[in-house]
């Protein structure tokens, strides 16, 4: 057989550039829509590659982007790996110090920045260990602040297009992205040409996103997260692309759907409640969408059901993380669960994270590393391996707390049922380990939130002499209920719904819960607070 | 990224054996149906691997099958490559001498033969250079003729299942198949684990066969042609499988569809007219089929249209050959040709061989190797490359008449249009090269067959002093028209439909056309006959 290498130019040259040259690429730039085609995008990517070469960028060099989801960002996606360099998409939502840390850590040679993000970038610069050459992508007109930065369109106009991409090994790095680092410094994951091609292939499967040349994809996952790889998949499968710029508001998303009529959307589960509320309020025409694929966080059944029944398209959940190239499992109903299944059955599958995708393998293991059965009850840390799953972090290697015998340790606790459907139960660090039993803090919180008096709930482990750890719940009550409901009443409420050992010994009624910088409940602070009060 | 190898056990162990263990595998054995599951098939494959190991089969050894499409043949498909050996599926329709030639050429260590084909195999044995150990698959009960052959079920019953598959490189050979050798000796193509995994992935694409875990596949391509790889694809995607044994008659196929309700069928275009006639006659219920994918020979538009309009499902054409692992292009309508397109437009695409599949590249080149434009008019030899396209023949290497600069020379002449749709125009050797112009013998024959008096037509090149070659037509007329239509009248008929240079100078009215052993018109004999008459 041929030794045909799996490289990004093989996605682009015969596909986006030739077969699918006429397929549309629509991009929101500022407040307007920019209309382009795959053919034009690749043509400009060749000019960009020529310009970057003239600026001294060599194969292997890192080229950073600090940009929204626009056609220019897409051009950078195609040009940089194709010329043998490494695309580094920087998460634009990080703090300036974190951005500086990862640009230094990745040793980026140059930064391509949206003009509308230039002020943010200028706040990063003082934290860098050395200055970086800057190219401005003119998404807004005001050039006054560009300073000594190069202008993207001027560079393209002056450049000689790169006619032939250099040959590159399929194992060579193609792009890189960093974890958000909520539990420490951001960690870099480097994606190879091979892993990117295989992941892109997977995105076209009928049992996954099903991208193809008659679909139009609305990419609600920001291009700043290259791990999800939507541009590469769309280039391979000839999928028309709608890029929302940086306006991911419900109104902005619905306006794009009404105008451009995409057939499939890929985004974050966390955005669904807002989108649903907007739809119920305004009833925009979303009828072009045949499905919406969501990752990032679990989608509650009332939300996915409302999309199915009211809005008219299904929500499909996926499990993915930076270390799995975004793509690990996909939640399609099993073959024998048809349209006539009960809502209970449909809900069961709709709220799972689905089954592993082809070539991705998943298992659950206990603290000692022993594999747990697939019975829908046994819990274990979810571990993943496969051709687009990381085996190490950039410049850190295979840390044993994250990688084990070729498996990625996700830090999530899950159960897997007999058919291989994965259900995330908790974060490993939030689990309460009580007398050898694993108690899901998420599950106890879910039950507490079912009580009409409860607004917020957080369950954390506290030290216990007999059991090692025991759950403790902190609850915020609705103001008007504050005086009538007691912790003991809530414990009785839980006792009717959970195994006795899962009911917290103590329920603290508090005025508010501590939050992290991105608005999540800060369980670390809670654990420390109550561990001390016990000690 | 992980260095996770692309090997056949990665299709089987986490997928068919675990996730999809309960999915059905139905197989016609003799006149009955055998009901099994993917889980059971893999369990028995592990026993078979243990048995073959006990018989001395080592990694790299070739294991031949001489069998129909049954669950046992499927078990051999999974066991042999997974244990590191090489599956050789022998085409059961070849002559005894040809079978012996390829079994010797592949150096097969052992042969697994259906009992119903044992008499055929016994006719092969005298032609072998050395005797082969024989295992009989008991598809019929009569064991009297088994002689000293081993019995498959007895081997499985006695064997220790192979619990862990040995590790194997993704570039290692997994299976092999031979061309039918109509133009010489059969040539062997060796498929690697990697090429098989990638081809199987492709079969799950929404823009290709779209196999998935809610589909049931009726495999009308015999398992004796491993190049098409349907069992591997079904194992990867969790597709339920219906195997027809050796009864590919229209009645036999329709009976299986009515009983087992497959959702997709993959077979040969040549079988469609017979299937259509049977359907029109008996009206069997084929409503479970959502599509039928056909390769092997072009499907005439009246036939594909009748399936769409009368029977109720579309026919999708593919281009493939032994050297392209069966899979090269796939004929889906382009995105902007919807349900409202004219029949002319739909027919244009339905009769093309479609667009190259992801990672498969196609081009057309003239005699001197110069690439021709994609304008729907320029003709050239179709050349193909990609990760599941051969670069050489077994033990023959890269013959320059078949392989060139990493491209496979298909021997077919094609045009490619602006959107990349490929249309086979003729076989290279049947083309008439007249004064620098390429004349398609197929096209001229097609026009002749449009005349009501014409039953058969064959166009061949004859030497010409001025033009190099000129077309000559041999025509068989309907008996009742024989005395009234002249060659000159047919030339006038063609002159109204073809460019002047394409009209044959001579039209010979003949009583019959010479045929090859498989019933095709023997153009070689015709060329020789008329070349001499001219000389």
Image: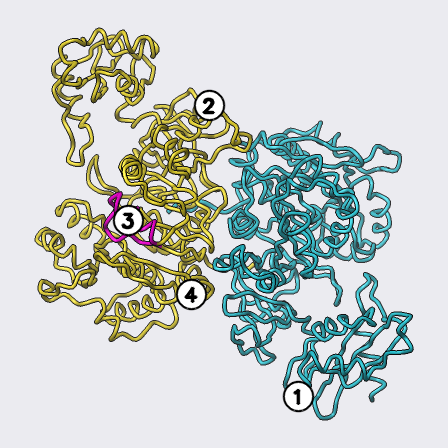
Chain colours: A yellow, B cyan
Query: Quick one: B142 or A260, which is closer to the camera?
Result: A260
Q: In the structure shown, which secondary structural element does the residue marked by tag 4 occupy?
A: loop
State the CA–CA distance, disc 4 to disc 2: 49 Å
Q: CA distance from mark 3 to mark 4?
A: 23 Å
Where's residue A362, x and y in %?
A: 43, 34
Same chain for the residues under marks 1 and 3 in the image: no
Residue on which disc 3 sits: A222
Whether callout 2 and callout 3 share a subunit is answered yes
A211 vs A401, left or right, is right
Q: Which residue is mark 2?
A: A373
B403 part of magenta stretch: no
Viewer can see residue B183:
yes
What's the magenta region? A242-259
Left or right: residue B204 versus residue B465 is left
Q: Specify the subunit that label 3 lies on.
A: A
Q: Residues within 10 Å of mark 2 (few under 14, many from 20)?
A: some
A245 inside magenta stretch: yes
Residue linked to disc 4: A21
The chain under label 2 reads A
Residue B202, image x and y in percent?
53, 51
Helix, strand or loop for disc 3: loop
In whole angstroms, how far apart are the C-alphas of marks 2 and 3? Answer: 37 Å
Upstream in sequence: badge 2 or badge 3: 3
Closer to the chain start, of discs 4 and 2, is 4
Helix, strand or loop under label 1: loop
CB-based contact (under 8 Å), mark 1 and mark 2: no
Q: Quadrant of residue A84?
A: bottom left
Q: Position of residue A21 (x, y in %)?
A: 42, 65
Q: Chain of mark 1?
A: B
């Amino acid at each position: 057989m041929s030794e045909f290498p799996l490289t990004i130019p093989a996605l682009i040259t015969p596909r986006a550039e030739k077969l699918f040259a006429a397929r549309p690429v629509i991009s929101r730039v500022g407040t307007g829509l920019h209309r382009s085609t795959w053919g034009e995008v690749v043509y400009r990517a060749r000019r960009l590659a020529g310009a970057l070469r003239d600026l001294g960028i060599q194969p292997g060099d890192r080229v950073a982007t600090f940009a929204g989801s626009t056609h220019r960002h897409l051009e950078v996606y195609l040009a940089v790996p194709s010329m043998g360099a490494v695309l580094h998409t920087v998460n634009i939502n990080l703090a300036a110090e974190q951005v500086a840390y990862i640009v230094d850590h990745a040793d980026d040679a140059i930064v391509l920045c949206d003009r509308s993000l230039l002020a943010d970038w200028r706040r990063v610069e003082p934290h860098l260990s050395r200055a970086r050459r800057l190219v401005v992508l003119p998404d807004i007109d005001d050039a006054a602040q560009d300073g000594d930065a190069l202008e993207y369109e001027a560079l393209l106009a002056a450049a000689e297009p790169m006619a032939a991409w250099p040959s590159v090994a399929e194992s060579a790095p193609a792009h890189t992205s960093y974890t958000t680092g909520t539990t420490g410094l951001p960690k870099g994951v480097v994606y190879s040409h091979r892993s990117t091609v295989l992941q892109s292939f997977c995105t076209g499967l009928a049992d996954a996103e099903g991208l193809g040349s008659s679909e139009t994809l609305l990419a609600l996952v920001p291009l700043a997260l290259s791990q999800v790889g939507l541009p590469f998949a769309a280039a391979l499968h000839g999928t028309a692309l709608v890029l929302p710029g940086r306006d991911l508001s419900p109104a902005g998303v619905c306006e794009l759907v009404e105008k451009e009529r995409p057939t499939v959307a890929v985004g974050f589960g966390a955005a669904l409640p807002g989108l649903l509320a907007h739809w119920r309020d305004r009833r925009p025409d979303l009828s072009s969408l045949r499905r919406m694929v969501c990752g990032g966080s679990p989608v509650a059944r009332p939300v996915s059901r409302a999309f199915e029944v009211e809005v008219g398209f299904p929500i499909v959940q996926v499990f993915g993380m930076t270390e799995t190239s975004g793509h690990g499992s996909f939640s399609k109903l099993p073959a024998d669960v048809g349209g006539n299944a009960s809502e209970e059955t449909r809900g069961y599958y709709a709220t799972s994270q689905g089954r592993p995708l082809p070539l991705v393998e998943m298992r659950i293991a206990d603290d000692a590393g022993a594999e747990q059965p697939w019975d829908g009850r046994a819990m274990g840390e979810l571990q993943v391996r496969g051709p687009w799953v990381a085996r190490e972090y950039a410049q850190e290697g295979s840390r044993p707390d994250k990688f084990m015998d070729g498996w990625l340790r996700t830090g999530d606790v899950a159960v897997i049922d007999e058919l291989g459907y994965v259900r995330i139960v908790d974060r490993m660090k939030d689990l309460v380990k009580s007398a050898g039993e694993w108690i899901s803090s998420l599950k106890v919180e879910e039950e507490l939130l079912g009580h009409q008096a409860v607004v917020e709930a957080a369950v954390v482990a506290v030290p216990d002499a007999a059991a090692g750890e025991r759950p403790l719940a902190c609850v915020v009550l609705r103001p008007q209920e504050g005086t009538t409901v007691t912790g003991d009443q809530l414990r009785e409420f839980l006792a009717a719904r959970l195994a006795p050992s899962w009911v917290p010994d103590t329920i603290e009624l508090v005025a508010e819960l501590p939050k992290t910088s991105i608005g999540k409940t800060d369980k670390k602070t809670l654990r420390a607070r109550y561990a001390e009060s016990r000690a």
